[in-house]
Amino acid sequence: MYLATSAAVLTLRERKNLTDSERTYLERRTCPIIPVAGIILSAILMFECGINTITFGVTSILIGIPIYVLMHRGPR
């Protein structure tokens, strides 16, 4: 999940099209460094996991998606 979030930060920053004067100090100093570091770290951690851990994670997500959809359905 953190990998997807880090990638989304890069995409959303590009969509905003802010000039340097409109960005915060932290955004100007670390523009792509923090999201790219998050992507790299997440990829390394995923490759270090065993197949059992990855299978458990994917299974948990696949079970959780229908539960989420059913719980957040509006009243009929």
Image: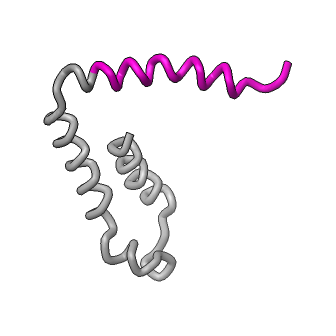
Q: Position of residue 46 (x, y in %)?
A: 21, 35
Q: Residue at x 33, y 68 (%)?
A: 31
- Give the residue furthest to the right: 76
State the quadrant of the C terminus: top right
- Residue 67 highlighted magenta (yes or no): yes
Specify whether 54 is left or right of 76: left
Q: Position of residue 40 (x, y in %)?
A: 20, 49
- Residue 41 highlighted magenta (yes or no): no
Q: Residue at x 36, y 47 (%)?
A: 7
**As drawn, 45 above or below 76:** below
Q: Which residues are magenta?
A: 55-76
Q: Residue at x 45, y 18 (%)?
A: 62
State the quadrant of the N terminus: top left
Specify whether 17 is left or right of 59: right
- Give the residue furthest to the left: 48
Task: Return the residue nearer the eye: 49 or 12.
Answer: 49
User: What's the magenta bit mostly, secondary-structure-wise?
Assistant: helix
Q: Position of residue 68 (x, y in %)?
A: 60, 25
